[in-house]
Amino acid sequence: MCRRAADSGVMGPLQGEPRRLNGGQLRCLYCGLLQDRVATLEHEWVFLEPDMTPLAHTVPAEHRWIELSDGRVTVYGVCPPDPFQRCRIEHRLACSAQRLPDLWPWLTALRAENGRRAERQLQADPEPSEPPEEWPDAG
């Protein structure tokens, strides 16, 4: 059974259409790495792991985010998916600083690599960057 986007860690509903479909990137509050802020079909926002597009059949149905032609994403619960279909995953699943169960082996490896990246980033720049004076509207 596939989950609705509202049940999968999406930040919250927007009133009307998103102001812009290209949400940009923000640093994760837990690990400090960049995450992509992307609009969903439901006019909400979700934070996705940047530069990560695994084959959809390797990701459980309720965690597959498929990019649409207009830049928005939606959970893709078709089982089984096309064997060549790519998808995105939420950053929270790949975040090394958040405790999650071992959902699938390659995700565990990704979380470990993100932990090493966050550690290297901290060593290169030990001073945490100041948060912006005004946070972007996340819904």
Image: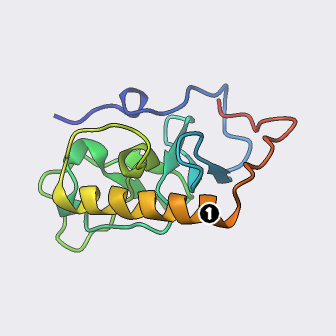
Residue at 43% x, 57% y is 115
| Residue annotated with mark 1 | 123
For the rendered model, the colour scheme is rainbow
Query: Could you tell me which quadrant the N terminus lies in?
Result: top left
Residue at 65% x, 29% y is 139
107 vs 51: above or below: above
Element carrying mark 1 = helix
Nearest to the observer: residue 5 or residue 121: 121
What percent of the width, then of the height, locates residue 131?
78, 40
Q: Residue furthest bottom?
A: 84
From the viewer's perspective, tell me whether residue 28 is left or right of residue 99: right
What percent of the width, then of the height, locates residue 10?
48, 33
What percent of the width, then of the height, locates residue 30?
53, 40
Residue 57 position by quadrant: bottom left
From the viewer's perspective, tell me whether residue 58 is left or right of residue 98: left
Residue at 63% x, 49% y is 27
59 vs 117: above or below: above
Residue 87 position by quadrant: bottom left
Q: Amino acid at mark 1?
A: Gln
Q: Residue furthest right?
A: 133
